[in-house]
Structure formats: structure tokens, C-alpha cells
Amino acid sequence: MGSPTLSTVVPSLVLLILFFVSSFLITVSSEPNEEADTLLKWKASLQSRNQSRLPSWTKATTNVSSKISPCAWYGISCNDAGRVINISLRNTGLSGTLHGFSFSSFPRLAYLDLTGSGLFGTIPPEVGLLSHLKFLFIDTNKLDGSIPPEVGQLSSMEVFFLCSNYLNGSVPPSLGNLSHISLLFIYDNLFSGFIPSDIGNSKSIFNLDLSSNQFSGPIPLFFGNLSNLKSLYLYGNSLSSPILSSLGKFKSLIDLQLNENQFTGYIPRSFGNLTSLSTLRLSKNELFGSIPDEIGKMRSLSVLDLNENQFKGVLPPSISNLTNLKELALLYNHLSGSIPPSLGNLILRELLLSGNHFAGYLPYNICQGGALEIFTVSENHFQGTIPTSVRNCTSLIRVHLNGNNLTGNISEALAIYPNLTFIDLSRNNFYGEISSNWGKCPKLDTLNVSMNNITGGIPREIGNSSQLQALDLSLNHIVGEIPKELGKLNSLTKLILRGNQRAVTLSFINKVCSSLEA
Ligand SMILES: *[C@@H]1O[C@H](CO)[C@@H](O)[C@H](O)[C@H]1NC(C)=O
Ligand SMILES: *[C@@H]1O[C@H](CO)[C@@H](O)[C@H](O)[C@H]1NC(C)=O
Ligand SMILES: *[C@@H]1O[C@H](CO)[C@@H](O)[C@H](O)[C@H]1NC(C)=O
Ligand SMILES: *[C@@H]1O[C@H](CO)[C@@H](O)[C@H](O)[C@H]1NC(C)=O
Ligand SMILES: *[C@@H]1O[C@H](CO)[C@@H](O)[C@H](O)[C@H]1NC(C)=O
Ligand SMILES: *[C@@H]1O[C@H](CO)[C@@H](O)[C@H](O)[C@H]1NC(C)=O
Ligand SMILES: *[C@@H]1O[C@H](CO)[C@@H](O)[C@H](O)[C@H]1NC(C)=O
Ligand SMILES: *[C@@H]1O[C@H](CO)[C@@H](O)[C@H](O)[C@H]1NC(C)=O
Ligand SMILES: *[C@@H]1O[C@H](CO)[C@@H](O)[C@H](O)[C@H]1NC(C)=O
Ligand SMILES: *[C@@H]1O[C@H](CO)[C@@H](O)[C@H](O)[C@H]1NC(C)=O
Ligand SMILES: *[C@@H]1O[C@H](CO)[C@@H](O)[C@H](O)[C@H]1NC(C)=O
Ligand SMILES: *[C@@H]1O[C@H](CO)[C@@H](O)[C@H](O)[C@H]1NC(C)=O
């Protein structure tokens, strides 16, 4: 092209060349473009009732002499050679299956994004023909059936999302051949059977999410090989057996969520080596034994969730070394002993200790960091007073102190909390009067002080709690009239007063009466 000799040749030769060039162009324009044809056939197969889907996908072309090219179509990008490399039809409501899609026509395709595009039916085995595919997003559809083993042939694949479908059966071991995969998300499907140990061959994987399926059996031993793993989500399955102590080798792990399974045995001591781990969720399993002292070495830990297991013994003092800890969740175990006072040095947002056998005093400086939002220590044997730091703890949202042996004057121990929605102080030995401060907690919906030694009357300011739904003052020594301001509270649906002095009288009658226990 553009050869300098052109200007020197006779005009007839120029004409001849022009003839050849133009006839070449004409030839090209009538040559079928396989990729365009394939896409148009697939479009025709889609059952979308909306005929205006993908309007740019058409044979019409504005340039009479140029060939039909899909490269300018919606969601399509091509390489310099005009071959399709990227199909992105995220959330397009295609309403069709993958079976009309001729995978063999796209040998250069690197990126296929059909997230949330209304796909149903099974995944065709031909998907394995996309030999250059690096990114495959077919999540958030209604795909069913199982993963064809041919997926293992996608040897360039780096990111694979097939989460949130109705896929079932077992996961094919061939996925272990995806040697460049870094993100594998298959959560929220109906997969069952064992997790294939071959997944462990994928050394590059750093985020593996198999949660919310029906996998059973142990964590396969493969994990020793996933040395780049940062996140491992296996929660919401039926996995059993002890937790592999070799997981402690993954010093790069940041997020480990094994909750809601049937794991048994101890927390491996090797976990002390997981110094990068920020989130550890082991709740709702059948783990037992004591919480190992090594837990204090996991210095990046921010969330420690051990709720609803069979742990016993004391809380290791080393836990106070976890200076990044924000959420300590130990609900419903068999833990005992007292809380290390140094726990109060942590700037916790959630302290969840309910349903254990803890005793002794609550750390006096528990809200010293001013971050505590959820303070849940009910159904234990705590004694003494509410820690003084709680009075100024304006961050509080939910407080459960019920079912302990706590004492002290509640109106002195507690103050005004702008975000407090729920507080249960029932079944303790609190005394003092109901404070008018409760009327200054604008979000309060539940106040329960039943079964204490509360005296005095009900302050009329309580009627300012515009969100108050449940007020339980039963089994105390409260006297006087129920202020009529309370009767004007539209939100109030539960008012329980039984077991107080006979002097408590109803000064109002309104719609709450049906649920009123006086
Ligand atoms: C059909 O799809 C087009 C483009 O996505 C949209 O603007 C139109 O509202 C849809 N019509 C119906 C009936 O869904
Ligand atoms: C038509 O051809 C011209 C020149 O080759 C090109 O610049 C233009 O982008 C083409 N238009 C379409 C719609 O393909
Ligand atoms: C493919 O196209 C989509 C949408 O234009 C874009 O977000 C994505 O980055 C592209 N992928 C690649 C690998 O070029
Ligand atoms: C998977 O689901 C299909 C229907 O979608 C069903 O026919 C098949 O039996 C299921 N297989 C397993 C292993 O559950
Ligand atoms: C993985 O690939 C190798 C070589 O390509 C092949 O021999 C093997 O069968 C594959 N493994 C699986 C589980 O598909
Ligand atoms: C994975 O680890 C196991 C034991 O730790 C080892 O036998 C196996 O060869 C490793 N596989 C690969 C692919 O490195
Ligand atoms: C922690 O790792 C070191 C070496 O990295 C190893 O010697 C030690 O046994 C590991 N500790 C535990 C408890 O697994
Ligand atoms: C807390 O960490 C320090 C320094 O690493 C260590 O000396 C101390 O023994 C740890 N405390 C507990 C209770 O484990
Ligand atoms: C509460 O805060 C006030 C003012 O910030 C301070 O003077 C008081 O000592 C604090 N009380 C407690 C118990 O921390
Ligand atoms: C109350 O909640 C709001 C909204 O979440 C937050 O911005 C504010 O800081 C909270 N107040 C206190 C005292 O923590
Ligand atoms: C409550 O504490 C008091 C005094 O601290 C003690 O005498 C009593 O036995 C405790 N009751 C319970 C149920 O623990
Ligand atoms: C209740 O409090 C009063 C004083 O307010 C006290 O005399 C009484 O002993 C307390 N009763 C109980 C059961 O703690």
C-alpha cells in the first residue's frame, strides 16, 4: 500500500490496481462474519419478549462497502484484528440459555460477562472451547444442572463467578486445572458432595468462596498448597471433621469464615501463626475445648466470632493483646471465669458474651474507647455494678444485661444515649428510680427493667420517647399513676406493669390495652 512506484506507472495500471482493490473490498463485504452471525443467531434464540433488546445487534451497516462487524455492537469489543475479545452484557435481561451460543466461534474471547442477565438452563460443555477466556461471569442467573468438567480446560481463566444460581451436583475436580485462577466464587448454589482436593492445585487462588451450598465432608488436605489464599469462605455448608491445623500455614489469610457447618474438635493452636488474619468466624459449629492462648498472637484480628459452639474454660488473658479487635462474639458457649480486666483496654464495637457461665465484674473501662455499640452480656453470673464508663458511652445501640446479679442505682449508672434502641436490665438487683433521661433517648424502642428493685413513679418524660414500643416495668416496687403522656405514644404496643405496688393505677385507656398487663 502507498508504494512510491504508483506515481510513476501509467494511468491504466492505476485503474487496474483500483479495480483490484475495490473488487477485494466487495469480496470482503459479502464474506460472512462468523462471530457476527453467531451472535445474531444467539440473539434470535433468546426468549426475551422485549424485541428492543440489543437493538445495535443487527446486519444493517451504514457503510455499504464495509463488512458486517459486531465490533461496534452494544457490549462487544474487538482486538485490532477485528476479533471479538470482550462480551459484556451485565444485567441486560436477555432471558435465554447459553445453548444457542456457539462457543467455538470465539477463540479470542477473553472476557465474558453475563451477570444477572436472565440466563437459565444448563452450562454447555462447549464453554471449555473458550481457550483464551480470562474472566467468566455467569453469576446471579437461574442456571441449573452441574458444572461441566470441560470448564477445567479454560487454562487462562483468572476470575470465575458462577455464584447465585441453582447449580447442583459435585464440583468437578478439573477445576484444579485452572492454574491461573485468582478468584473463584461459587457460593449460593446447590452444590453437594466433598470439596474436590484438586482445587488445591490452583496456587494462584487468593479468594475462594464456596459458601451457602450443601458441601459435606472435611476441608480437603489440599489447603496446604493454596499459599496465596487471602479469603476462604466455607460458611453455610454441612462440612464436618476437625478443622485442619494446616490452615495455620496460610500466613497470608485475612478472612476465614467457616461458620454454620458441623465442624468438631478444637481450634488448632497453629492458628496463632495467622498473624494477618482479620476476620475469624467459627460460629454455629460443634467445636469444643478451650479458646487457645495462641489466639492472642493473631494480632490483626478484628472480628472473632465463636458464637454457638461448645467452648468451655476461661477467656485467655492474651485476648487483651488483640489491639485491633472490634467484635468479640462468644454467645452461647460454656465459658466461665471472669473477664480479664484488661479487655476494657480494647476499643470494641461489639462485645457479645451472653449465655455462658461468666462471673465476677465487668471491666470498669469497658467503653473507654467510646466505640461500644452492642453490649450483650445477659444470662451469665456477673455481679457488681454497671461499669462507670458505660454512663458516658453514647455510642451504645443495644444493651443486654438481663439475667445476671448486677446491682446499683440505674438512674445513676446510665445516662442519655442518642442511638440506643434496646436495653434489657431485667432479672438483676438494680434499684433506684426510672430516670426521666429515658425520654431523651430518641431511638429507644424497648426498655425492660422487670424483676429488679426499682422504686418511685413513672416519669411523665417517658412519653417523649417517640419510638417506644415495649416498656416492661413488671415485678418491681413502682408506685403512682401511669402518666397520660404514655397513653399518647402511638408506637407503644406492649406495656407490662404487673407485680408492682397496688398504687399503680391506669390513668388512661387506649389501644394498647389489649396487650397491657397491669
Ligand atoms: C425494552 O427494553 C428497552 C431497552 O432496554 C427498554 O427501554 C424498554 O422499556 C423495554 N420495554 C419493555 C416493555 O420492557
Ligand atoms: C464507515 O467507514 C468509515 C471509513 O472506513 C469509518 O470511519 C466509519 O467508522 C464506518 N462507520 C461504521 C458505522 O462502521
Ligand atoms: C470488557 O468490557 C467491559 C464493559 O465495557 C469493561 O468493563 C471491561 O473492563 C472489559 N474487560 C476487558 C478485559 O477489557
Ligand atoms: C440437579 O438438578 C436437576 C434439575 O435441575 C436434577 O434433575 C438433578 O437430579 C439434580 N442433580 C443432583 C445431583 O441433585
Ligand atoms: C488436568 O489437565 C491435565 C493435562 O492437561 C490432564 O491430564 C488432567 O486430566 C486434567 N485433570 C482433570 C481433573 O481434568
Ligand atoms: C499439595 O500438597 C500436598 C501435601 O501438602 C502435596 O503432596 C502435593 O504434591 C501438593 N500439590 C501440588 C500441586 O503442589
Ligand atoms: C508457626 O510457624 C512456625 C514457623 O513458621 C512453626 O515452627 C510453628 O510450629 C508454627 N506454630 C504453630 C502453633 O503451628
Ligand atoms: C501480650 O503481648 C506481649 C508482647 O507480645 C507479651 O509479652 C505478653 O505475654 C502478652 N500477654 C498475654 C496475656 O499473652
Ligand atoms: C463523662 O464525661 C464527662 C465529660 O466528658 C467527664 O467529666 C466524666 O468524668 C465522665 N464520666 C465517666 C464516668 O467517665
Ligand atoms: C449515632 O449514629 C449515627 C448514625 O449511625 C452516627 O453518625 C453517630 O456518630 C452516632 N452517635 C454516637 C454518639 O455514636
Ligand atoms: C448475687 O450477689 C450477692 C452478693 O454479691 C450474692 O449474695 C448472691 O448469692 C448472688 N446471687 C446469685 C444468684 O448469684
Ligand atoms: C430494695 O431496695 C430497698 C431500698 O431501696 C432496700 O431496702 C431493699 O432491701 C431492696 N430489696 C432487695 C430485695 O434488694
Image (tube, rainbow, N blue to C red):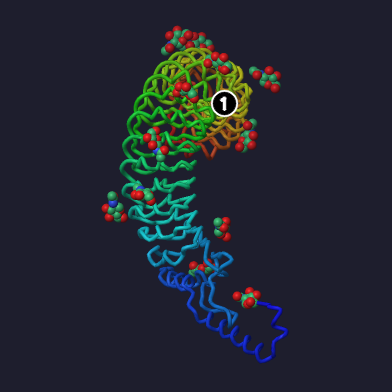
**Which image quarter: residue 373?**
top right
Give residue 352's position: percent from left, percent from top: 49, 26
The correct choice, above or below, for 43 with respect to 432 in the image is below
Instruction: Looking at the picture, tell me which residue is in the foreground, 441 or 518.
Output: 441
The image quadrant in which ligand 9 is located: top right
Give residue 286's position: percent from left, percent from top: 35, 28
Say if residue 198 shows up in the picture: yes
- Residues packed near mark 1 inside 10 Å, few (<14), some (14 to 19) or many (20 plus): many
Q: Which residue is at 69% across, 90% downward?
A: 10
Instruction: Looking at the picture, tell me which residue is in the foreground, 192 or 131.
Output: 131
Q: Label 1, on which residue?
A: 348
Q: Which residue is at 51% across, 62% downward?
A: 87
The correct choice, above or below, for 80 with respect to 412 in the image is below
The correct choice, above or below, for 407 with respect to 77 in the image is above
Determine whether, in the image, residue 457 is placed left or right of residue 378.
right
Say if residue 235 shows up in the picture: no
